[in-house]
Image (cartoon, coloured by chain):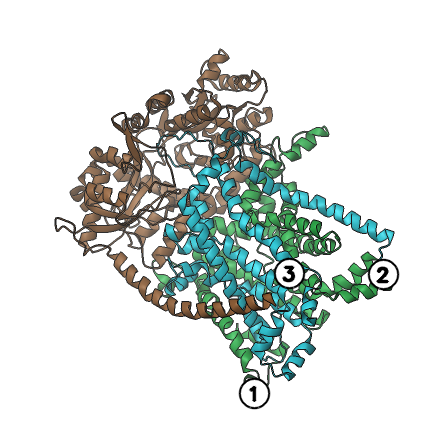
Chain colours: A cyan, B green, C brown
Amino acid sequence: MRESVKDRIFQGALTFLLMILGGIALVPLLTVIAQSFSSKAASDMNIINLWPVGFTLDSWKYILSDVGLWRAFFITIISTVIGTALALTVTALMAYPLSKENFKLNHIIMLFVIVTMIFKAPVVPYFLTLKGLGLFNNPLVLILPHILSAYNLAIMRTFFKQFPAEVEEAAMIDGCGYFQILYKIIIPSSKAVLTTVGLFYAVTIWNQFQHPLMFIQKTELFPLQLKIRQLINGGSDIANIAAVANVNYTEGTLSAAAVVFAIIPIIAVYPWLQKYFAKGAMLGSVKG
Amino acid sequence: MAKKNKAAANEIKLPKSRTSLIHNIKKYWPYYLMVLPGVIFFLVFKYIPMLGSVIAFQDYSVFKGIFDSTWVGLKHFKALLTYPDFRRIFSNTLILGLCKTVLIFPIPVILSLMLNEVRNLKLKKAIQTAVYIPYFLSWVIVGGLIFDIFGVGGLFNNIRNFFGLNTLLAMQKESWFRPIYVVSSIWKDAGWGTVVYLAAISGIDLSLYESAAIDGASRLKRMRYITFPLLVPTILTLFLLSIGSFLELGFEQVFNLLTPMTYSVGDVFDTYVYRVGIQQAQYSFTTAVGLFQSTIGLVLVVTFNKLANKFSDDGGLW
Amino acid sequence: MKWNKTITLLMAGTMAISTMTGCGAKENLTETTQTSAVSQSPGTNEESGEGEKIVDLEVWNTNIGFLEVKKDGPLYNLYKDMFGVGIIQPYVEWNGGTTYQEQLNLKIAAGEMPDMFLPVNGMEVDLAKNGALLDLTDILPEKAPHLWESIPQESWDVIRSYDPSGEGRIYMIPTVIDYPLMCGLIRQDWLDKLGLSIPETQEEFVEVLRAFKNQDPNGNGQTDEVPTGGRQEARWMDHLFAMYGIAIWEGYPQWDVYDGEMTYAGVTPNMKDALLFIRGLYEEGLIDAETLLNDKAGWEGKINSDRVGVYYHWAQSSYEYATTMFNSIGVKPEWVVLPPVSAAGYKGFYTEKKVKGIQWVIKNTTDQEKIDACMKVLDAYGNPDLREQFFLGVVGEHSAMVDGKLKRLPDDKKTMENLVFQPGNDISTVESIVALLESVKSEDIAWAFDQSIANVKSMPQYGKIIAGDGIPNSVYDGYPDIMNRTLYVEYASKIITGEYPIDKFDEFVDKWYASGGEAVTRAAQEWYAKTQN
C-alpha cells in the first residue's frame, strides 16, 4: 500500500508524540527502580531521581533473602493462574448466553449483574458471609471472590455480540450444540478479548490486597502484596526502645525494591500476550 | 427494588406469559445451564452480603448484630444531608466526577487510535508496554512521587526557577488540586485503559481499510470513519460501566493527593466516609453514604442505558 | 490450533478444580468451625508435664510487621515458662491503627473477640457500655497485685471515670508515664559551633533559628539548613505551640483549663497567637517550607541528613536519630532537650499526661480458668522483676549474648516474633526508661544513648500535667470531625501558609462550636467535674 506524504507526516508526528508519552509513563517505574538501588543517605536526603545515588544492593538483599516473600510469591502465582483460568471459564460461560437476544433472561440478568457493580455490600455482612462459607484463613479466599466481575462480563459480552451470526448458524446446521459452538467457534476466535479479560482478572488477583487483609491472618498463607506490607510497614510512630541496626536501606528503598519485585512478573507477561492483539487476529481465525 | 424491576421489565418487554419462558428454557436450556455458575456467584458473593445494607437504617452495633440492633429509620441519611460541609463534599465530588467522565474517560480511546497508527511493530509494542506500566504502581507510590515532583527542589520547581519564577508548593494550593488529579489519573491509568480498545481494534476487518485506501481515504479519515465507529460499542459499554460509579472517585487516589490545605476542593464522599465512618467504625453511617452514592449511580446508569439503547441499536448494557 | 487446545485443556482443568473446590469448601467449612470452636477455648484440655493445665489466650495489640506469635513457637514457650499461660497472636496489619480497628470490629461482629487486646480510637468505652469487658475492680488487686501497685492510684482513678455507668468500675489497664514524653530537641553541636547558647526567650529562639538558617552550621557550604519544622497536618511541631501555654499532643490540641474553664486548646486565644507566630516563621523561611507536606519518612530524612536544627519528638528516642545520622553520613550530632520557651505574656510548658492511653482490656467471660489466666498474665506484666525478661524476649531471636551480657538485638521483622508485652514502655518512669536505654546501649554507640539518657532525666522539670489528662475519647461521641480535628487542621494549615489571614481564626472558632464543639465541650467539662470529686 502506498502512503501519501501527508499520511507519513501524520504517522510520524503521532509516533513521535507517543514516544514522548511513553517516556513520561516510564518515569515512575524508573524512579522506583533507582530508589531500590540507592543508599540510605541518598534516600534520606531525597535526592534520587531517575538514577540510583550511592549504588547498593542492600535493599534487594534484604528483600530477596526473606523466605516468606518467596512463599508469598508462589502463593500469588498459583492463585493467579488457577484464578484466571477459572474466571475466564465462568465469565465466558455467562457472557455467551447474555450476548444472545433469543435468551429470554438476557436483560434481566444483565441488570441483576450491573446492580452488583453499583451497590456494594457493607464490610461487616460481607466478612460474615465469607467467613460463614469457611473462607477465613483459607487460601481459596484468594481465588473464589475474584472469579467473576460484572465489568469483565460486560466487556466480554460486548465482544461476543459483535460476532457474526452467520458463522454460528452455519455451525448449527453442521450439528453443533451450544456448548460446542462456544468451545469450538466463539472461544478460538475471541483471543483478543479473552486475553484482555484474562489479563484484567490476573492483575486483580495478583494485586489483591483487601481480601487477604480481611481474611488471612496466618503469615504462611500471605499473598505477595500482604507480605510486602508486612515487610515494609512503616509510617507509625511507636515509642519502643530498641537497638538501631546499622543498615544501608530505609523503608523507602525497601518498599521500592519490593514494589519492583512484585510488578516485574506481571509486566513481563504483557509483551508475550501482545500477539493476540495483532490486527485482524480475530478475523483470521474465523476464516481459518 | 420491586419497583425498579418492574420499570426494567416494562422497558425490555419480558415474555408476557410464563409459558413462553418455559418454552424458551426448553429450547435454549444450554444457555440457562451456562449462566448458572455466574448467577450463583453473584447471589452468594454479592447479593447475600448486600442484604446487610439494612444496617443503614439501624444503629448497628457489632455486639448486637443485625437482628438486635435498634432501627433508626433515616437518621443516618439525615445526618449526611445536614452535615455542615455536605454541600462542599457533594460539589467537590460532582466536579471531580465530571472531570473523570469528560476529561479522563476519552483519553484511552484517543491513545488507542494513535497507537493503531504506529507502523513499526516493535516500537508499537514498546510504547504500549511503557504506557501501561504506571497502572501497576499503587497510589501510595505515585502519590509520593507527585509530592516529590511538586516539592521544594522537585522537577516542577526546578523548571519554575529556571524561568525565573519562585518556588511554588502546588500540593498545598487549592487551584492546583483538580489539575493534578486529572493529570495524575491520566498518567497512571490511561495506558492501561487502552487494552480493551486495542483488543477491539484487533477485531476490525482489514479489508475495510484496504478498500478505503483504494478509494483514496487518508489515514485520518480512515481513523475517523472506520476505526472509531467500530469502537463505539466498546466505548459505550465502558462508559456505562464507569458512569455507575460516578460519585466514587477512587479513594486511594484522592486520599493520597489530599492535604488539609486542599480539603475545600478535594474532600469528597470517599475521604469523608473514611474519616468519619471507617476510622470511627460507624458502620451504619458508612453504609448510608454508600447507598446514597449507589442510588445516584443507579439513576445515572439507567438513564444513560436508555439513551444508549436509543442512540445505537442494542448499545446499552441491558 | 495450539490456542484451541490450551483453552480446552484449561477449561476442562478448571471445571475439575471447580467441582473439587466445591466439595472442598464444604469440608473446609466444617473444619474451620471446628478449629474455631477449639480456639475459643484453646488448649484447655492440653496438659503440661506437671499435669497442670495450660490455658491459651488470644492477645491482640500493635504489630508493625513482626511475625505472628504461634502456638508452641519460641515466644509462646517463653511466655508459658514465665507465667504459665500460652499466648497466641495472629498477624493483624496495624496501619496506624485503622486496619487493626477494622479487623478487631470484624472479629467482634463474628463473636470471636480476642481474650485480651489493645482498644483503639476510644472504642473501650463503647465496649464497656455493651458489657463486653471484664470488670477488673475487685479481682485486679487480689489476683494481679504487681500490676495494681505498679500503676499509681491517681491513674486508676482516671480509669474509674471511664466507666459509662458512672459507678467508677475499672475495665481497662492504662499505659502510664511519670514525665513529659515529648519535647523539642536542638543540635547543641550547632549552637557550640556558632557560639550560641540554648535560647531562653522567644526572641533568642528566633535568633537561633536565623543563625541556623544563615550561618551554615552543617558546614557544607550550602544554605540547605532547615532551622525547624514538623510534619503534615501541623503535627510534630508542638514545641512552637508550647511557647503559648497550649496543651497539645503530637499536634492534637488537648483539653486544659483556660480562663477557669475546661477548654479545647485549639480554640483558645493562645492558639491564635501561636498560629500568628508560626506563620511569621513560615514567611521568613525559619520553618521548613514543606512542614505541612512532610510525611514521617520525609521529615525524618531531613533530620537524619544533617539539615535540621530543632525537631519535636520523644526525649528517649534521640539516640535513634543520632545513630542513624552517624551510620549513614558519619556526623555525630548532639541532640539535647530544648527547655520550653515562653512567648511574651505566656508560660510555656511541655504537655504532660500521666495516663498516655489504654493498653489492655479483657473480654468479659464467666470462664474462671480464662479469668485466672488473664490475671496471671497481668500480674507478670506488672512485675518489675520480669521487666527485663519481657524486654529481652527470646534469647537467640530477640536478644543475644554480647560480652557476657544479654543484649536486645536490632529489630528484624523477618526473623522476630512480635513482642506482645512491653511493660517497660507501657508503665514507664524515668528510671525504667533509663534502665532500658542502659540495657540496649553498647560501647560503640554509647555516646548516642548517653544523650538520650540525659535528655530523659532532664524532662520532669519541663512538664505541666494538663487538666485533660486521661480524658476518654468518648467525649467526642457523635462528632468524629471534631475528634479528627479536621476543621482545626484545615484552618491552622492555611493560616500558617498565609493562605488565610489570621482573622479567619475567629471564623474557625465559631464554626467549631457550631459543628459540635459545643456538645463536646460540655461532655469534657462534665467529665472534668467528675474527676475533681
User: Residue placed at 24% from the left, 55% from the top?
Assistant: C42
> Which structural element holds mark 3?
helix
Q: Residue at x 18, y 53 (%)?
A: C368
Q: Position of residue A229 (x, y in %)?
A: 45, 45
* Structural distance between the alpha carbons of marks 2 and 1: 50 Å
Q: Are marks 3 and 1 in contact (CB under 8 Å)?
A: no
Find residue C310 and name its label: none
Assign the N terminus of chain C to one quadrant of the image. bottom right
**Where does label 1 land, which residue?**
B23
Q: Share a chain, discs 2 and 1?
A: yes
Q: Amino acid at mark 2?
A: Ala
Q: Residues within 10 Å of mark 3 (few under 14, many from 20)?
A: some
Q: Which residue is mark 2?
A: B217
Mark 1 residue element:
helix
Query: Which element carries disc 2, helix, strand or loop?
Result: loop
Quarter occupied by the C terminus of chain C: top left
Residue C428 seen in the current view: no
- For image coordinates 47% across by 29% down, the residue present is C241
Instruction: Say left or right for B76 vs C46.
Output: right
Q: Position of residue A242 (x, y in %)?
A: 35, 32
In this rendered view, identify the residue nearer to me: B74 or B54.
B54
* Residue mark closest to the camera, 3 vs 2: 3
Chain of the residue displaying label 2? B
The amino acid sitting under disc 3 is Tyr
Q: Are marks 2 and 1 in contact (CB under 8 Å)?
A: no
Q: CA distance from mark 3 to mark 2?
A: 28 Å
Residue at the disc numbered 3: A276
